[in-house]
Amino acid sequence: MAVRQICACFVLLGSVGVASAADAPVHDPLWKAALDKAAENRTWRPRRILEDERLIHPKGGMFDRRTESVHETYRDEEGRWWARLVSAVRGGKDVSEARRKELEKRPKREFFKPENDVFGPLWNASNTATRTQLRHEFEGRPAVGFLYTMEARDATWVGVVFVDAVSGVPRLITVVPDRFPVQENVTIRNMTLEFYFKEDGERWSLDRMEIRSNIEAKMSALFTWKGRSEVSLKFEDWYELKD
């Protein structure tokens, strides 16, 4: 599904209202099936995240850069989920220490925030996604697109969720936020996020996350790098929480 088609859907359906907290939303049966599937799998978490970050300059060549990193997930005392760097490779060389210093300058990334979960009870207690005319196929199976708008802590998220037309199993979320992470010496011009899901027997889980943005990075007092950032996060080695 082309991103421009989904973005066009955002414009056409931009007037769709969000239910007030006092309302008890009546969920579309297919959306309700997606919520039920997500609830069955909410206790699962990945042990590893494989990150592939590419910085692509319009002219290519020496200005391009690719970094492949391995992270491990952990939960803090407050129940929040984070990831710590295990190793990083760039141009065939180990750059783990340099990568750690780079990540220290960026906002710390929290995973699996309940308030950012469109399938979670917090958002769905007072809101519901809206069925659209968008259709797509995943592995030969038809999927239906649902539009949602979420006021998250760090941005307003406008997204389209594709769920299996028969079972309601979520397959893809495409999101366009209205604000972006603030990073030292880096300006983000736009951003699109895509979340791909997969089924493995009875289990449903997040397979990978794709983040694309145009950025300007101040490398020195005399040089500002302008280009495209493409980040792929692959979630692996899932396990079920026991507590």
Image: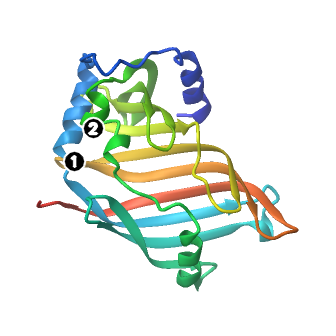
Mark 2, residue position: 120
Where is residue 92 drawn, in percent x and y? Answer: 60, 82
For label 2, the crowd category at 10 Å Cα-Cα, with few meaning under 14, some 14 to 19 and many 20 or more, is: some
Q: Nearer the viewer, mark 1 or mark 2?
A: 2
Residue drawn at 36 percent across, 28 percent down: 142
Q: Is residue 21 above or below residue 199?
A: above
- Verify CB contact (< 8 Å) between mark 1 and mark 2: yes
Mark 1, residue position: 42
For label 1, the crowd category at 10 Å Cα-Cα, with few meaning under 14, some 14 to 19 and many 20 or more, is: some
Where is residue 199 drawn, in percent x and y? Answer: 26, 47
- Left or right, residue 90 beside residue 25: right
Q: Is residue 31 above or below residue 153?
A: above
Amino acid marked by disc 1: Arg
Is residue 94 visible to the viewer in this orientation of the structure?
yes
Is residue 167 visible to the viewer in this orientation of the structure?
no
* 3D distance between C-alphas at marks 1 and 2: 9 Å
Residue drawn at 44 percent across, 66 percent down: 50
Q: Is residue 109 above or below residue 36?
A: below
Residue drawn at 58 percent across, 36 percent down: 178
Residue drawn at 54 percent across, 71 percent down: 104
Choose between 15 and 77: the one closer to the eye.
77
In the image, which disc is placed on residue 30?
none
In this picture the colour scheme is rainbow
Q: Secondary structure at mark 1?
A: loop
Q: Is residue 197 above or below residue 164?
A: below
Amino acid marked by disc 2: Gly
Label count reads 2
